[in-house]
Amino acid sequence: MEKWRNTHRLLRQSTKSLFDRRSHPNFQNSIHLSDSRFTHNFGRTCKPFRPYLEHQKWNPKTCFHPLRDHLEYPKTSMGACIGKSGKIQCRFFGSVATKTQRHPSFSSLNADDISYFKEILGEKNVIQDEERLSTANTDWMRKYKGSSKLLLQPRRADEVSQILKYCDSRCLAVVPQGGNTGLVGGSVPVFDEVIINTGSMNNIISFDKVNGILVCEAGCILENLASFLDNQGFIMPLDLGAKGSCQIGGNVSTNAGGLRFVRYGSLHGNVLGLEAVLANGTVLDMLGTLRKDNTGYDLKHLFIGSEGSLGIVTKVSILTPPKLSSVNIAFLACKDYLSCQNLLMEAKRKLGEVLSAFEFLDKESVDMVLNHLEGVRNPLPPSMHNFYVLIETTGSDESYDKEKLEAFLLRSMEGGLISDGVLAQDINQASAFWRIREGVAEALMKAGAVYKYDLSLPVEKMYNLVEEIRTRLGQSAEVVGYGHLGDGNLHLNISTPQYDDNILAQIEPFVYEWTSKHRGSISAEHGLGLMKANKIHYSKSAETVQVMASIKKLLDPNGILNPYKVLPHSLLSYN
C-alpha cells in the first residue's frame, strides 16, 4: 500500500502526457530487442519480424509414402485440372500434428510459366533466388516450410488478376503472402505453390480527414499506416506486436485482433470496403467508403478472415478513430484469477468510455519474460504475484481521465481486487509495461519449443483450461497463460526443451475438446491456416462447414487459392 501511495503522489506532481505508446516519436529508440536487426513495434523503422529463430533446428521434413486412409483425398478431379504428379508427396511438420499430401491435380511449374510471369511483371519481380525463396517458404516460427520455386511480386491489382487467371487455367496452386507473420502456417506454401507477395502494392490512395476513412493498398505495413495516421491526428483501430512487418491485406485476410479490440472491435466492423481478386482473375470492386450501404449481400465479409482462400485482397478501405491525447497505463497485481475477473467487470463499469486495453498475465508468463529477455525488470519488486493485469485508458481530458483511473485503482485496492500496482509516469515506463506483455511470445521462443493455442472462451472459464493442462502435463512442460481478458481471448502456451510427440498427444485433441465443450473457439484471432484446418469442427457445425466448402467451390472451383488451409482436407473435392 505504501508503494501505491508513493506512486499516487508522484503522479499528482507529473504534468507530462502519455501519448500513444507506439506512434509518439520518442518511442523510436525506447525499446529494442537483443537482435540488432529488429526494432520492437514502438519504433518507426520496419524490420523483419524474425528474431532469435535462425539458430533453431525445428525444420520440417519432406517425405514420400503410400496413401493412408485417413489422409486420402477423394478421387474426383478438381475442376478442369489434370494430375501431373507421379508420386504422392506427404509433408510432416515436426511435432505439429499436421500431415498433408500434395493434391495430384495441381500442375508443376515449367519454363513457359516463368516466361509468362516475366512478361507481365518484369524480370526483377519474378524471384527465383534460393535465399529469398528460403525466407518466403518459411514461417517466422520456423515450424512450417514449403518448397516453392517461385515468388511473384505484383505491383497492381490488374497484375494480380493476370497471374491468377493464368494460374487457374494451368491449375498452378498459389499462396498469397504479406508480411508472413502468421502463427498457423497460413502464409507459406505447403508444397510448391507459387508465392504471390503483395508487399510491392504499398501505396496510400486517399485519406478522408472529416470521416477518418483510409483507403490503401494491401501491401502497406501496419506500422507505416499508423505513422501516417499519427501525422493526421488518427490511429489504426488495430495494434499488433508484429506491426513492423505485417501488412494490412494480411491483417484483413486473417481478421487480426490485437490489443485495441476491447475498444474498437474487429475488422469486420472497421473495414468499410475492399478490392479482391478471385481465382479466375475477376476483380471485385467493393472498395466503398460509406458507413451505411444496405444494398444486397455484403460480400466483403467473405474475404475478411478467409485467409486468402477465396480471393486475394488488393485494396482496403478502413475506418480509423481519432487520436486521443490522454493515455494512462497501470500495471497491477492480483492474488487470484477471480480477482482478475472482478477487476475486469469493475473496469467496464467504472472506466467505461476510456478503457482501451485490459490484458492479463499469469506468474509463469512474467517469469518467462524476466528470465529470457534482456533489460526487462519486474515493475512490482521484490515479490512475484500470481496474476498481473495491464490496464490502458485513452481519452481526451488528461486530468479527468487520470483522476478517474486513480480513483478506480484506489477503490479496487481497498476492496481487495488489487494486491499491488503502479501507474506509468512517463512514456518510457509505459513502454516498459507493454514490453512485458508483448514480450511473452518472444521469451517463449527463446526458452525452447512451444505449443501455441489461441482460444476464445467465456472469461469465467478461461483459466480453468490452463490449470487443467498444467495438471495434465505435470513437470514435463511449463504451461503459460496470458491474453486479452477484455475480450475473452486466451493465449495458452506450453513450453518444452524440444518438441515431443508424447507431450503433444497429451495436449491434442484434449485442448480442442475442452474448448468445444465450453462453447469456445479454437481460433480467436490467429486463424486456422494449416495447423487447424482439420480441427474446424470443434468450433463449427458440420452444416456450417459444408456451406463454407460450397462457397470455396463457387469462388475457387479449381482450388488453387491457398490450398490445404482453413477447411478440412476431406472436403476439398471439386467436380
Image: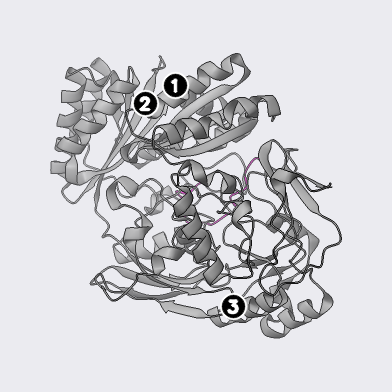
Q: Which mark is residue 363?
A: 1
Residue holding disc 2: 388
- Circles 2 and 3 in contact, beta carbons < 8 Å: no
**Residue at 31% in and 38% down:** 486
Query: Which amino acid does the dot numbered 3 rest on?
Result: Asn
The image shows residue 480, relative to residue 565, as above or below, that is above
Give the extent of the magenta segment. 40-52
Q: Which mark is residue 280?
A: 3
- Circles 1 and 2 in contact, beta carbons < 8 Å: yes
Answer with mark 1 or mark 2, whichever residue precedes in sequence.
Answer: 1
Q: What element carries label 3?
A: loop
Position of 91 with respect to 324 (left or right) is right
Residue 219 visible, this angle: yes
- Distance of mark 1 from mark 2, alpha carbons? 7 Å
Position of 170 with respect to 201 (left or right) is right
**Residue at 27% in and 74% down:** 290
Q: What element carries label 1?
A: helix
- Circles 3 and 1 in contact, beta carbons < 8 Å: no
